[in-house]
Amino acid sequence: MDNACAVCHDHAPAEHYLCDACQYRMRSWLREITRQLPLLHAVLRPDTGPAQRGGSGRAHSPLPVDVRVLDLLGPGHVVPWIDAHGDQTGGVPLEPLLYGWARYITREIQVPSVRRDRHGTVWSQLCTDPWPHGGSNVPAWCAWLQAYLPYVARQSWAEAMYDQLEDVVNRIQQLTHTRPRSRPMDAPCPDCSAFGLQEREGEFHISCSVCSVRLTREQYDDYRAAIMPGLVRTALLMQAQQERTRQAAAA
Ligand SMILES: [Zn+2]
Ligand SMILES: [Zn+2]
């Protein structure tokens, strides 16, 4: 295989189908899903206003839950990943999606489970179902899948899992009206010199919004340490010059 990432076609490590940045993004999405769960539960029941007691006439019964959120949080069947791009993508709920991937990975890896009975005989059989720490729920599956991401990144189906996680995180963020935060960096872009470098939540790279140059955080820190003293000195000299010009004009 060549070492191009299946998602962004950037350079990927040897024997990998995902580059470091796309792996980082998947890990961030799994953390984000857990972080967003309380928000999803909060928007599940739209504010229907105070209960009307003692009213006369036929009671109006508004829909008690937001069905789009219920779609996501509700139960559902595990969808085989090869079918998930077909007609069934419409509303794969969160937990069956995560559990489906965990089960798929377990069966692919064929981890042996070993137990010893009371007579001391060792029994070994292949695991067919994953067992996360902390029970079977969304945060537990997110943690389980994060632990297996290094394995996932080496599989030809990694892109399918990437796409499905991206889709589900987009659905969640639309419902909770949240967006990844970004922060402008104080050093100018090393390529186009514009002040366009931004650190975006969940992204491996700091990137320039003007020319799309990308730097890892370590590269940015080294670059900033090298360039900023000179920039600050120049700015101070310019400020002093302006002050002298202003004083000369006032004299
Ligand atoms: Zn990539
Ligand atoms: Zn730039």
Image (tube, rainbow, N blue to C red):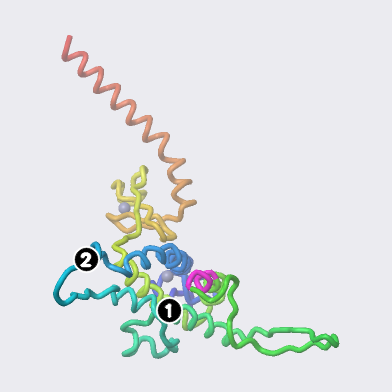
What kind of secondary structure does the magenta stretch mostly adopt? helix
Disc 1 marks which residue?
159
Q: Quadrant of the C terminus?
A: top left
Q: Which mark is residue 182?
A: none
Q: Please say whether residue 21 is visible from this viewpoint.
A: no
Residue 127: image location, x then y, percent: 63, 86
Residue 176 within the segment the image draws in magenta: no
Dot 2 falls on a residue whose secondary structure is loop
Residue 60: image location, x then y, percent: 18, 75
Q: Is residue 227 above or below residue 148?
A: above
Which quadrant of the figure has residue 247?
top left
Q: Nearer the viewer, residue 29 or 192?
A: 29
Residue 140 within the segment the image draws in magenta: yes
Range of magenta residues: 138-143
Q: Nearer the viewer, residue 219 or 150?
A: 150
Dot 1 falls on a residue whose secondary structure is helix
